[in-house]
Image (cartoon, rainbow, N blue to C red):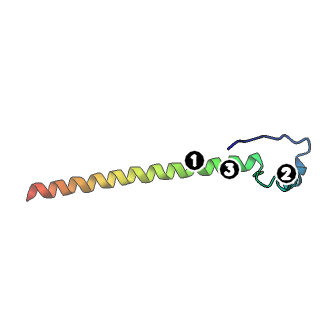
Amino acid sequence: MSFLGIQLTNPERAPQIAAELEAAFPYLMISASADHTNRMQDFATMQAMFGTLIALTLIVGGIVMMDERHDDERL
């Protein structure tokens, strides 16, 4: 995967130029740099949520294991 930046002299024509490039090169994905910035924030949020979920899973798992161990000692 590679990224190629194109700076336009007239940014208002960006959608038109993107459509022309996609028509000429259908295997390319054309998007504005602002779209990538928004996606990066989504990835950061998703990574934080997964990290929190993993931490919560470890804490709950540890408590359950300690409780099981405590029950075994009482028998």
Amino acid type of the residue tagged 1 in the rendering: Ala
Q: Secondary structure at mark 1?
A: helix
Q: Using the image, determine if residue 57 lies above or below residue 6.
A: below
The residues bearing labels 1 and 3 have C-alpha atoms spaced at a distance of 10 Å
How many discs mark residues in the rendered view?
Answer: 3
Question: Which quadrant does the N terminus fall into?
Answer: top right
Q: Using the image, determine if residue 31 lies above or below residue 4.
A: below
* Mark seen at residue 44: 1
* Mark seen at residue 21: 2
Point out the frontmost of discs 2 and 1. Answer: 2
Task: Determine crowd level at label 2: few under 14, some 14-19, many 20+ residues with C-alpha closer than 10 A.
Answer: some
Give x and y (percent) for residue 52.
45, 51
Point out the frontmost of discs 3 and 2. Answer: 2
Task: Determine crowd level at label 1: few under 14, some 14-19, many 20+ residues with C-alpha closer than 10 A.
Answer: few
Give x and y (percent) for residue 14.
86, 50
The residues bearing labels 2 and 1 have C-alpha atoms spaced at a distance of 30 Å
Task: Determine crowd level at label 3: few under 14, some 14-19, many 20+ residues with C-alpha closer than 10 A.
Answer: few
